[in-house]
């Protein structure tokens, strides 16, 4: 068993520069990658696509998740699931937003296996 303290990991996460959200990989296996995102007020991750299923779970704070059908408010206890190749992004509201992104299968595996 591997118990992950997402609040601690989010607090220690680093950003490439001050204008970008902080991220940290908290778990990686052949099956999945789990990444914590800590977005400051107003920060965002622009819409993009991934060949895997992506699930965003709100750990703390409030913000917005965007997808092919627009933008929706999210808060603690919310999970958003994106199908493979579905456009997805996120934005913090006027407070810090901490998300756990679960990417399954782990990025790269689907392409190597010849899947979509």
Image (cartoon, rainbow, N blue to C red):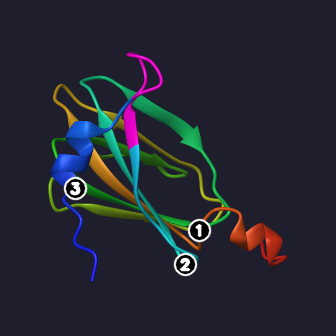
Residue at numbered disc 3: 6
CA separation in Å, label 3 and label 1: 19 Å
Q: Does the residue at mark 3 contact the one at mark 2 (Cβ under 8 Å)?
A: no
Q: Residue at x 28, y 33 (%)?
A: 92
**What span is in magenta?**
15-23
Name the N-terminal-most of marks 3 and 1: 3
Residue 8, numbered label: none
Q: Residues within 10 Å of mark 1 (few under 14, many from 20)?
A: some
Residue 35 percent across, percent down from the top left: 41, 54
| Nearer to us in this view, 111 or 68 | 111
| Quarter residue 112 falls in | bottom right
Q: Residue furthest front?
A: 1
For the question of whether residue 66 can be seen, the reply is yes
How far apart are the alpha carbons under marks 3 and 2? 20 Å
Q: Count numbered badges in the picture.
A: 3
Is tag 3's residue or tag 2's residue first in the polypeptide sequence? 3
Residue to which mark 1 is pinned:
106
Majority secondary structure of magenta residues: loop
Q: Which residue is mark 2?
A: 31
Rendered position, 15 above or below 19: below
Residue 98 vertical placement versus 85 (above, below): above
The x, y position of residue 69, in whole percent, is 50, 52
69 relative to 12 in the view: left or right: right
Q: Nearer the viewer, residue 52 or 13?
A: 13
Do residues under tags 2 and 1 come within 8 Å of each other at their CB atoms?
yes
Q: Residue at x 15, y 42 (%)?
A: 61
The residue shown at (55%, 78%) is: 31
Magenta segment includes 107: no
């Amino acid at each position: 068993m591997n118990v992950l303290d997402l609040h601690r990991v989010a607090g220690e996460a680093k950003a490439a520069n001050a204008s970008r959200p902080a991220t940290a990989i908290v778990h990686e296996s052949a099956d999945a990658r789990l990444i914590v995102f800590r977005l400051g007020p107003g920060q965002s991750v622009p819409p993009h696509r991934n060949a895997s299923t992506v699930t965003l779970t709100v750990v703390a704070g409030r913000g917005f998740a965007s997808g092919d059908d627009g933008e929706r408010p999210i808060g603690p206890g919310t999970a958003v699931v994106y199908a493979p190749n579905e456009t997805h992004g996120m934005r913090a509201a006027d407070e810090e937003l901490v998300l756990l992104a679960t990417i399954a299968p782990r990025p790269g595996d689907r392409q190597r296996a010849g899947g979509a």
